[in-house]
Image (cartoon, rainbow, N blue to C red):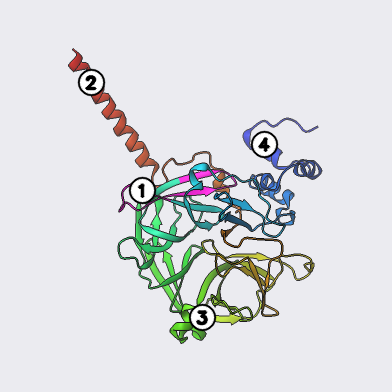
Amino acid sequence: MAPPPTGEGEEESCWSQLPIDEMEKILKRLTVVDRIRVAAVCKSWQAAVGFLHAPSPPPWLLVYPGLPHPRRWGLCTAFAGRRSLGLEIPKELQTQWCCGSSKGWLLFLRTTPEIFAGYRASLLNPITRVLVHFGPCVNHVVKGVISASPLTTGFLLATMGYNLVDSYRCVTVYRVWQLTYGELDVDDPMDILFHHGRLYILTGSAEIVVYMFKPHPVVSSIIPIPSLVWEDERRRRSRKGRLVGSNDDVFIVFYTTKLRSELQQLKVFKVKEGLRHRVVEVNSLGGRTFFIGGFSEGLSVSMTKSSSKSESMKPDCIYYRKRVEDNLKGYCMQTGRSFQVAGLDVAGDLLSWFTPDLEDRSSLMEVTPTNGFSRSRSLLLTIIVTSVCIMLGYISGRVSI
């Protein structure tokens, strides 16, 4: 028997080196969600879980059912039937608008009593149940993405939405911990994505604007998509574009919103980086599978071409939905045809994709900020309230005398 640990570091090392057979016995008794929480503890436990080989691998669907179902947000499987994962969204967030699914966090908004005070925002990690509150968000947000975990002081939140006063679509970047925000000079944004610290903005004029933030936002490049730049306005309005980050690459997926377009090919482009950035059209995803949705980050999952034909999630396919009235569809890059995802009825539901970030160690921090904008502001408020109470007590004492 090994000697008992003598220090904190040795104790952590002891727990991280549990025998694999003992870990397997424990993991077999856990739910999928509990396995994720185990995998987030350390790298050796993550390897033991082998989460990508679980019966219900991510990405999952974040669903808000339409009537007559109970209207509440919930996480469920997408390719093993619509089964709830048992991850409860806090009651305080159930009636709020969810407008972001990014890097393992969900963004919720609620209105404030003051009409011009914007929205109060919350970021939730449904796996660790960490909740970060901040605000205000100054626009009506359609989609929000984050650059890193919101528990790191340097993280950025980018939102795409409509200005509350003039109702034009814009992109706003928030430095939450620094209490600052700024609107970026981009016309007609269609989608946004943080990738390796840079913000990619896809515009309606078929361009990609790339911003860097060191320390202030600067446009590093503007990349046109040649085959789409000269499209007429009617065709342009019927297209939607989504950005997908995959390892070191950024892809753009365009699809049409027309009703009679089942046989029309989706267009996929890849950003080629070098001395001169350019965009090229591709006919294969290289064994990857893409998942694109309304307010979630575009997701990429690497798969092998040896996947069984009975599997619903296949390589070189894109899973998407045109409209709220539609069920989930898949598009095969090899055949150029769309197909329905069997056994999943989500027509009429609000939905988006969600996948946990198992590499995010900051989600295990013990200190959770009570106000996402600034812990120092919370401390200052406490000092002010305490001082006022002391002064009132002193005055009251003098009056009573």
Q: Which residues are magenta?
A: 110-132
Residue kind at label 3, given as amino acid type: Arg
Q: Nearer the viewer, residue 43 or 28?
A: 28
162 up-or-down from 89: above or below: below
Residue kind at label 2, given as amino acid type: Tyr
Between discs 4 and 3, the one toward the N terminus: 4
Which residue in the structure is indicated by mark 4?
10
Q: Quick check: marks 2 and 3 in contact, CB under 8 Å?
A: no
Residue kind at label 4, given as amino acid type: Glu
Which residue in the structure is indicated by mark 1?
112
Marks 4 and 3, how far apart at CA: 51 Å
**Residue 115 in the figure: left or right of residue 35:** left
Between discs 4 and 1, the one toward the N terminus: 4
Marks 2 and 3, how far apart at CA: 70 Å
Crowding at mark 3 (Cα within 10 Å: few <14, some 14-19, many 20+): some
Q: Is residue 398 magenta?
A: no
Q: Under tag 3, what secondary structure?
A: strand
Between discs 3 and 1, the one toward the N terminus: 1
**For the point 59% across and 79% down, which residue is it?**
261
Between discs 2 and 3, the one toward the N terminus: 3
**For the point 65% across and 64% down, which residue is it?**
301
Which residue in the structure is indicated by mark 2?
394
Which residue in the structure is indicated by mark 3?
278
Residue 151 visible in image: no
